[in-house]
Image (cartoon, helix red, strand yellow):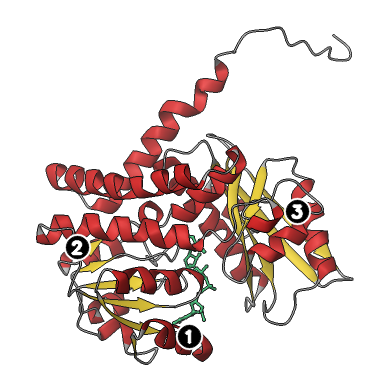
């Protein structure tokens, strides 16, 4: 399928390809929607097998950001960027600065942040070329790594799920498995241990496993085992599309609550989970903590206000679960409706002028 047909199908506003041969930069920036505000979303640095795979990923991820921002009540649209490459090998100053210039060329329609393979230090370099980069280090005047905020929001969502399923927000003695203990998974493991949860982890990158085992005394299992471990909650915190026909059949949990974006490979996978009696917390609802934190940076960062807004993920999850139950629909559908109804209701507000005269003379009129 050609790029234009793909973009028409997914409803994107704009897709920008950027290339800087000197640094090896190959990037695609996708703006899905600016209906509620500038499109904000992280930059994923990943060794995609093909350009088509990179395009497919950035289109899916940016669409997810539109839903995430809308459901979180933020005045932001949805966008995302990918850079094709190996984040442990291919980063260099010129690459980030060339990328910063490409982001800058969009004049604030797209604001970038962290994602898989990028760090707040990388963003500090991007920031040298554009003001449209958020989540830069605290020492540089930013809000720092958003991952702890994402983990905090996940915990709030998990407590709402616990209350709904088991009648108590107390997680003591529960068993949670985490797939991927990178930036978010690491902090989530720490927070769960503080709640006296039994935590079982895995990661394809052994040093990440070693660190979390050593720091928090969690148990580790093999990458292929994690989805079959008998547990209360499975938490996908690695990459997306891991919930599919084959994997859902193997799950041995009561709920799925994780940070990974686009966990469902296909829309019908939400029904597959429901058919197996597994409660699925919509990813874009419970993983919005980092986005909320980054949004606060754009407002002039206050940690107290950011925490307050991140914790609201718990209340929002409870209300989505209640709504889904009352209407006999899946939480995924209730959350999507929440997001699309907000876009529908707010997006045309810009038609109402705030007053004052603006006049542009158009040549020839
Ligand atoms: N960082 C944030 O604040 C944030 C916010 C919202 C959503 N997310 C999403 O959460 C997920 C994790 O983000 P992160 O920032 O922690 O990324 P990260 O790159 O720091 O961590 C991901 C970890 O998953 C591991 N991994 C990859 N494939 C795996 C597999 N098949 N099995 C087990 N482990 C695997 C990696 O080795 C890595 O350690 C991503 O999908 C990201 O888009 C992150």
Residue 70 image-quadrant placement: top left
Front residue of 260/220: it is 220
As drawn, the label of residue 274 is 2
For the C terminus, give its image quadrant: top right
| First of labels 1, 3 by sequence position | 3
Under tag 2, what secondary structure?
helix
Secondary structure under badge 1?
helix
Q: Nearer the viewer, residue 126 or 152?
A: 152
Establish if 18 lies above or below 324. below
Q: Is residue 106 above or below residue 138?
A: above
Which of pointers 1 and 2 indicates the residue nearer the eye? 1
| Label 1 – label 2 distance at C-alpha | 35 Å
Left of 359 or right of it: where is 209? left
Cα–Cα gap, marks 3 and 2: 43 Å
Q: Is residue 171 left or right of residue 213?
A: left
Label 3: which residue?
A: 127
Which residue bears the numbered disc 1? 211
Of residue 281 and residue 146, the one placed in the foreground of this image is 146
């Amino acid at each position: 399928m050609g790029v234009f047909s793909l973009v028409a199908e997914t409803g994107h506003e704009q897709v920008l390809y950027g290339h800087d041969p000197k640094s090896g930069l190959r990037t695609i920036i996708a703006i899905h929607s600016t209906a509620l505000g500038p499109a904000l979303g992280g930059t994923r640095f990943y060794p995609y097998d093909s350009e088509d795979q990179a395009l497919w990923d950035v289109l899916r991820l940016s669409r997810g950001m539109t839903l995430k921002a809308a459901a979180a009540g933020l005045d932001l649209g949805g966008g995302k960027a990918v850079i094709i490459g190996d984040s442990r090998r291919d980063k260099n100053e010129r690459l980030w600065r060339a990328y910063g210039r490409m982001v800058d060329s969009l004049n604030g329609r797209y604001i970038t942040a962290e994602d898989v393979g990028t760090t707040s230090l990388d963003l500090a370099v991007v920031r040298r070329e554009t003001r449209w980069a958020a989540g830069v280090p605290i020492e540089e005047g930013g809000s720092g790594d958003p991952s702890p905020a994402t983990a905090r929001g996940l915990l709030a969502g998990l407590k709402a799920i616990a209350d709904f399923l088991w009648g108590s927000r107390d997680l003591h003695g529960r068993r949670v498995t985490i797939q991927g203990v990178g930036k978010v998974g690491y902090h989530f493991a720490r927070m769960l241990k503080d709640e006296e949860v039994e935590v079982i982890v895995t990661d394809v990158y052994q040093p990440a496993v070693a660190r979390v085992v050593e720091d928090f005394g969690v148990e580790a299992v093999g990458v292929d085992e994690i989805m079959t471990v008998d547990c209360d909650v499975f938490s996908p915190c690695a990459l997306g599309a891991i919930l599919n026909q084959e994997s859902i059949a193997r799950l041995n949990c009561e709920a799925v609550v994780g940070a990974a974006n686009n966990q469902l490979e296909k829309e019908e996978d939400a029904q597959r989970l429901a058919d197996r009696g597994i409660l699925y917390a919509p990813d874009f609802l419970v993983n919005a903590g980092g986005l909320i934190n980054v949004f606060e940076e754009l407002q002039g960062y206050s940690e107290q206000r950011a925490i307050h807004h991140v914790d609201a993920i718990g209340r929002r999850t409870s209300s989505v679960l209640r709504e889904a139950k009352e209407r006999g629909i899946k939480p995924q559908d209730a959350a999507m409706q929440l997001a699309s109804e907000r876009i529908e209701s707010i997006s045309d507000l810009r038609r109402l002028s705030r007053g004052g005269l603006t006049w542009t003379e158009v040549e020839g009129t």
